[in-house]
Image (cartoon, grey):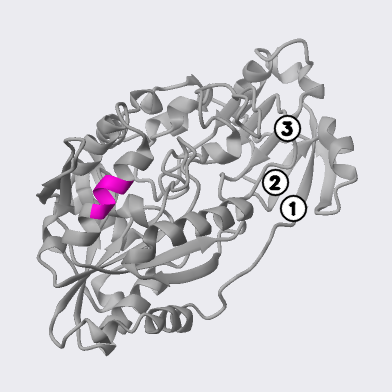
Amino acid sequence: MMAAMSYPRMLRIRQQFPSERVENIPAEVEAQLSRLKLGEKVRAGQTVAITVGSRGIANIAVITKAIVDHVKSLGGTPFLVPAMGSHGGGTAEGQRAILEGYGVTEEYTGAEIRSSMETIIVETTPQGIPVHFDKHASMADHVIVAGRVKPHTGFVGEIESGLHKMMLIGLGKHEGAKIYHRAIRDYSFIEIIRAVADVVISRCKVLAGVAIIENAYDETGRIEAVPPEQFFDRERELLKLAKAWLPRLPVTPLDLLIIDRIGKDISGTGLDTNVVGRKFIHHEASDRDDVNCKRIFVRDLTDKTKGNATGIGLVEFTTRRAVDKINHEITRTNCITGGHPEGGMIPITYDSDREAIAAAVSTVGMVELANARIVQIADTLHLAELLISEACLDEIKANKAIEIIDGPIEMSFDHNGNLADV
């Protein structure tokens, strides 16, 4: 019966987004850090801890090596600190492995990786929040905070994800991440940020920040070195730029969004809620979301996520092959630490894409499967080229930023009933 169903015809399209890009990354990092004249503060032989996070930041190994090289040029002794809260299963070995998986190795960067889950409590904020800080970083003479500035997947504010989050969640390690995520239940994130960041900057020898913004093509769009006293003001402005550069789906609403893969290297929530429109309410769009996907189907996990399926609980349908890849311990640790246990819940699971798609569309209303508004994407980072169903064709025809590459052609399944990746 399933084989006799009429599935929609699909078109392959290409979207055009703002594409500012840093062409020579090492030279740009050097130029940006040179502006800050850090040689006036770093003495020969002094140690400098450099943060590296767990997000899949484009060119992160190249950027990190360039920071290391600049510190060495000042006579300093750089070392790398994994700054990723509870990721990597909340273990020092797991966090080191994440860095090495991104190419951030001691051999390539020329700097030692000092990975530990131990923290010190620097101070307690006026709200009663203990400020945790990575033990190795606390022993350094200076700290450089490097991280990507982008919209957060769970809230809206002047500051979302970026240098401040690296100081709080990243360098706070598992213990800090747990307490800050708990505190969000009682205080606004901006209150926590201001209180904790003030302590970290004043007490933890923060030398500089390196803010990274990516364009909609998952490329390094801008790198900016920021002095600590300007972290808040500059990150607030850079966040506006990051939001403007965010890749977007070409049409909304959708009956079904098909995502080839999710993972921690794609987004903190596996899939970026800013893109799919589930930032405020799980399983449906709110009046504050720009996108409305009635149903979401996740086909697989990325290899680099190492079984961390955080965010899979935000969707309704998935496959057996995705579920079989889940490392439940790592996923559980991440979701509990973040205060979102629902992020690890297992959706309705099917053996084939064909079955999942038919089931998903059957739950959205009176629409026939062949006429459903469907979009298939590789992941929420890569939206330049994707597939849309024929029902969306009229909506994109007048959009000069969209090019139809191929189609419409029949939605094609292999002998196992599975689609090809975008």
Label 2 CA crowd tier, 10 Å (few <14, some 14–19, many 20+): many
Kindly indicate whether the residue at mark 3 contacts the one at mark 2 (C-beta within 8 angstroms).
no
User: Can I make out residue 84 in this image?
Assistant: no
* Residue at point 64%, 36% (across, down): 419
* Residue at point 70%, 51% (across, down): 385
Q: Nearer the viewer, residue 354 or 244?
A: 244
Q: Which residues are magenta?
A: 194-198
Q: In the picture shown, does residue 233 fall above or below 165?
A: below
Q: On the rendered structure, is 254 left or right of 55?
A: right
Closer to the chain start, of discs 2 and 3, is 3
- Residue 358 at x, y = what percent? 67, 19
Kindly indicate whether the residue at mark 1 contacts the one at mark 2 (C-beta within 8 angstroms).
yes
* Residue at point 32%, 47% (across, down): 194
Residue located beneath label 3 in the image: 252
Q: Nearer the viewer, residue 208 or 315?
A: 208
- Residue 56 at x, y = what percent? 43, 55
196 is within the stretch colored magenta: yes
Residue at mark 1 to residue at mark 3: CA–CA distance: 15 Å
Classified by dominant secondary structure, the portion drawn in magenta counts as helix
User: Can I make out residue 155 in this image?
Assistant: yes
For this orientation, the residue located farthest to the front is 126
Quarter of the image for residue 414 reads: top right
The label number, if any, that marks residue 386 in the structure image: 2
Q: In the picture shown, does residue 386 fall above or below 102?
A: above
- Residue 415 at x, y = what percent? 63, 33
Residue located beneath label 1 in the image: 15
Residue at mark 2 to residue at mark 1: CA–CA distance: 8 Å
